[in-house]
Amino acid sequence: MNLHGKVAIVTGASSGLGADFSRRLVDKGSTVFGLARRKERLDELQKELGDAFVPVVLDVTDEQAVRSWVKDTFTDLVPDILINNAGIGKFGPVDTLSTEDWHTMINLNLNAVFYLTSSVTPLLKRNENVCHIINIASIAGKLGNANLSGYNATKFALGGMSDALMKELRNDGIKVTCMYPGSIATEFFTHSGGSLHDRMMQSNDVATALINVLEMPDNFLIDEIVMRPLFPKSAK
């Protein structure tokens, strides 16, 4: 796909991976609708990137708001790319994980993906060009981890959903890719109760991998990509 002139939707765009995905897409000549709840962060990114970045203050776990936004926004304009990036991790032993934290992860990591993907897919099907959906899972969607049972559950489920969608939509000219990154030095990690170290992957490098996947020839489909730090532990 030639990204120049394409229209992309990126969730969780206010920081971390979502912000770097938006930067790289705008740099390639795409228009990006960046979805997030933090207006001030989105406005800062819009000042940095210019009019090619369209800030959208939206809670993607609000089904009605998501479906209304898609219907109202894409009347004449047709999207080419959907990046389901927004996610949250709540870590801890299963016997201390609260029901609220469980539902928070299910709502953002899974339900929100369904709301947006099911709303946008009819538009992608009408696009005469090859389109692309990318879901950002985690290495925790490949391997179970003690004290991550809830997060593991959502990311394993997202991987299964992505595999099913790839098989369902490929004949409509829609690629589906699931990305499984390991530890990345972003605020997601600290908000989830972890700590950053010097050998974690950098979000801009993950963004490079995403751009490479998007720019592959139309008849070349990468349905999964797993990324890890070469050295997983701190050098210090």
Image (tube, rainbow, N blue to C red):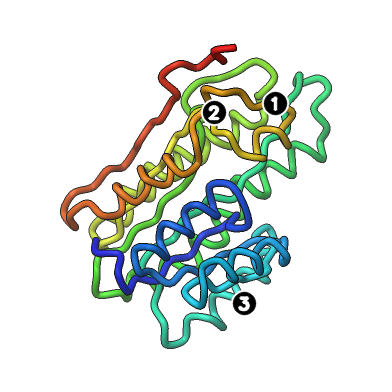
Measuring from the top left, give residue 21's x and y in whole percent.
47, 54
Q: For the residue labelled by badge 3, is the local secondary structure a helix, a strand or a loop?
A: helix
Tell me the CA gap for discs 3 and 1. Answer: 36 Å
Q: Quadrant of residue 129?
A: bottom left
Q: Contact, CB < 8 Å: mark 2 with mark 1? A: yes
Q: For the residue labelled by badge 2, is the local secondary structure a helix, a strand or a loop?
A: loop
The residue closer to the viewer here, 9 or 44, is: 44
Q: Residue at x 62, y 52 (%)?
A: 15
Q: Give the crowd class for mark 1: few <14, some 14-19, many >=20 residues within 10 Å.
A: few
Dot 3 or dot 1: first in sequence order is: 3
**Amino acid beneath label 3:** Ser
Q: Which mark is residue 116?
A: none
Tell me the CA gap for discs 2 and 3. Answer: 34 Å
Q: Residue at x 22, y 51 (%)?
A: 216
Measuring from the top left, give residue 34's x and y in whole percent.
56, 65
Vertical side of 47 occupied by 59: above or below: above
Image quadrant holding the C terminus, namely top right
**Amino acid beneath label 2:** Ser
The residue closer to the viewer here, 76 or 233, is: 233
Q: Residue 195 vs residue 84: left or right?
A: right
The residue closer to the viewer here, 7 or 119, is: 7
Q: Give the crowd class for mark 2: few <14, some 14-19, many >=20 residues within 10 Å.
A: many
Quickly name the residue at label 3. 68
Measuring from the top left, give residue 150's x and y in whole percent.
67, 30
Dot 2 or dot 3: first in sequence order is: 3
The residue closer to the viewer here, 42 or 118, is: 42
Quickly name the residue at label 1. 194
Q: Residue 171 vs residue 155: left or right?
A: left
Image quadrant holding the N terminus, namely bottom left
Vertical side of 2 occupied by 98: above or below: above
Of badges 2 and 3, the one in the foreground is 2
Quickly name the residue at label 2. 183
